Amino acid sequence: MRTSFLFLLATLVCASSFTAVRYITPVRSHQISKHTRTSLNSKAHRYSPRRISSKYSSYLTRLWTETSIGSRKSLTRKKLVKSCKILEKLLDTDVEFRDEELVLALRETLVTTLKSLEDQPQVASPPSSSSQTSAAVTASSTSLTSSTSSTSPTKQKKKGSRSVLRGVLMGVAVAVWVFSGNYIFTSLFTLMVLLGQLEYYRGVMSTGVYPARKISVLGSCAMFLTALYFPSLHQLCLPAFSTLSMVWFLTAKRNASSISEIATTFLGMFYIGYLPSFWVSVRMLGVREHTRLAPIAAPILSLLGRKATSLPGWLPAAFPLPITQGAIFTFWCWLAIAFSDVGAYFSGRKYGKTKLGEISKAAGETSPNKTVEGVIGGCLVSGGLGMLGAWVMKWPFWYLSGSVHGVILALLGLVGDLTASMLKRDAGLKDFGDLIPEHGGVLDRVDSFIFSAPYAWFVMKFVLPWLKSFVM
């Protein structure tokens, strides 16, 4: 399953009065062995801010290098060599070529081309270029499939436990991130989008298409910052940077650009920049209103308020304690989307009999393992969580508005999931990246949250005020 238990621990803390202490056996300090302490220290070091920052910067550097001009030339050379060798093989085996002079001329041209390509100095590139990464992923998946019988159940159990643990830790981190404030929320989102953009363009380059990478990355990051600092200008970012990219295609390139290069550039800005930037707009909407869980959260908010008074005065007012209504709404939206994936996985695994391809051939070809029963199970789970969130946030007609809202989020998450799978299938990739072990790259984790962002903004901005007008 993809985002299993993403918000598990966060839900237990934020959505109920559950206390995990009563279920934990107290352990005295002298009862902890030296090996256990060493293990705990190593795990703490693994998730330290310095280690995370170092991993982020190294991954960003690798992605930037793999989408550079040097990597493009190296990839093009490999494709040319492969095409020449295929044509040479056809000349040797195809009996349809009757003109011997034409065959000899083509053969001489191929020999000359191959020699010139192979004699050219190779452009230095990291070991894991886009094509090599794809091949490595394919090889590793093949070897894993062939060696499943030889893998012991103990190792598989440990691997599953690590995957669940990483999912829980990501869930807690995301919950803290949502309530961290407008500035921290937007900054981390921008850093994440930077990686997602490069993952996307690395996949596009593996198909032989070379878009305007730098302008697209700059435009996508600008959309998030504009949504934070200049909300009224947010809608102008996409047309502005689309125009700028066309100016670059017309003036900076030696040859005329193809439709594929222009289209993939626009898609990158729209799909990974413009659409998810609406979460920043949602995060900034409304002031904090009391929910039904306010008595539970009151001590924590009081503590944060006391800590905030000791922060430097130069920090923005929204930095220390910016828990807006938009933040609470974002949390419940993300919770519903994440657990719709979990519900779809378990429902499809237990009851799945009708393949999604029986309804839509394109969707079935994109994701052959998805079933109609899984989609229904995901919608039921998301609808239930949407109804719970509507009750907590005191929505009008919460039992109806919340359930419909949750089902729509699940369906939009499915659209995002299938879209990412379609892009990966066309590029011949298993995952967009390898940043998170056993979870893939950034785009592999956030694909279900992309298309739901404009819808969430529309609900928060227009639908909820309209519903509240009926009860006032």
Image: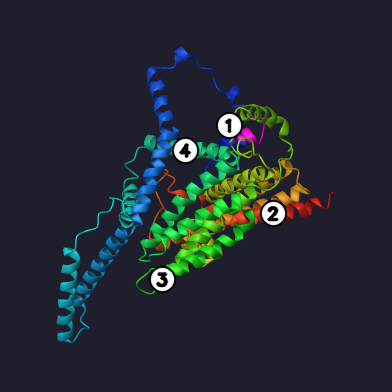
Mark 4 vs mark 1: in front: 1
Residue 448 appears left or right of 438: right
Q: Per the image, is 15 magenta?
A: yes
Mark 4 vs mark 2: in front: 2
What type is the residue that disc 2 sits on? Val
N-term mark: 3 or 1: 3
Mark 2 vs mark 1: in front: 1
| Quarter of the figure with residue 72 | bottom left
N-term mark: 4 or 1: 4
Give the spatial CA distance, label 3 vs label 4. Answer: 47 Å
User: Which colour scheme appears in the figure?
Assistant: rainbow
Q: Per the image, is 256 magenta?
A: no
- For disc 2, the marked residue is 459
Q: Position of residue 310 (x, y in %)?
A: 60, 27
Q: Position of residue 46 (x, y in %)?
A: 41, 32
Residue 353 appears left or right of 132: right
- For disc 4, the marked residue is 166
What type is the residue that disc 1 sits on? Pro
Mark 3 and mark 1 in contact? Answer it, CB < 8 Å: no
Residue visible at 46% across and 66% down in the picture: 245
Give the spatial CA distance, label 2 vs label 3. Answer: 42 Å
Q: Secondary structure under badge 2? A: helix
What type is the residue that disc 3 sits on? Thr
